[in-house]
Amino acid sequence: MQFGYTIIYVEDVRESLAFFEQAFGLQARFIDPTGCYGELDTGATALAFAAHSLMADLLPEGYRAAREGSQPLGVEIGLFTDDVEGVYRRALACGATGLTAPRDTPWGQRVSFIRCPDGTLVEICTTTKR
């Protein structure tokens, strides 16, 4: 078994890709001509976005979108950086909602949490203990 990808279902794939490009410096590596599916260049495992309309055919019973509700879904995207404070500030400037300001954890990481405009929960953190 090998982890292949994560797909986040959103209202507007292009807007979500643009947010991740502006806020986190990740680059889009693919977007289909219809704009219903796109991927970020994140290394071996793809982080992708797909339109809710695309999933409607595959999961006809529906699902709860990340944007729904006042609290984020219990799933996060973790992004490593040495500059947690700077990336946190840039994400807020790009339209994210701050959930927890950068802080040190008992296990030694520096972490913060934001909620993207599309509702996705993102942890911005260091890779190792400080």
Image (tube, rainbow, N blue to C red):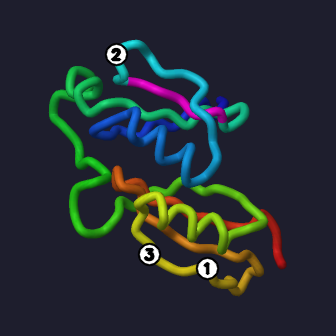
- Give the CA distance from mark 1 to mark 2: 38 Å
Q: Is residue 65 above or below residue 2?
A: below
Q: Secondary structure at mark 1?
A: strand
> In the rendering, which numbered label is found on residue 116?
none
Drawn side of residue 27 relative to residue 57, left or right: right
Residue reaching furthest top?
A: 33
Label 1, on which residue? 102
In magenta, the rendered stretch is 37-41
Q: Residue at x 38, y 33 (%)?
A: 13
- Is there a contact, CB below 8 Å, between mark 3 and mark 1? no
Asked which secondary structure carries label 2, the reply is: loop
Residue at 37 percent of width and 22 percent of height: 35
Which of pointers 2 and 3 lies earlier in the amino acid sequence?
Answer: 2
Residue at mark 3: 99
* Residue matched to label 2: 34
Which percent across, then down, holds residue 79?
64, 56
Q: Residue 88: where, in percent of width, then height?
A: 58, 68
Badge 1: how crowded within 10 Å, few (<14), some, or many (20+)?
many
Residue 86 or 80: which is nearer the viewer?
86
Q: Tag 1: residue type?
A: Pro
Taking the image as shown, residue 51 lies to the left or right of residue 28, namely: left
Magenta part, dominant SS: strand
Residue placed furthest toward the left: 61
Helix or strand or loop: what does disc 3 sit on? Answer: strand
At horizontal 31% and vertical 30% (from top left) the residue drawn is: 51
Residue 83 quadrant: bottom right
Q: Quadrant of residue 120?
A: bottom left
C-alpha separation, residue under disc 2 versus residue under disc 3: 33 Å
Q: Position of residue 1 (x, y in %)?
A: 65, 29
Quadrant of res 34? top left
Amino acid at pointer 3? Leu
Q: Is residue 110 above or below residue 12?
A: below
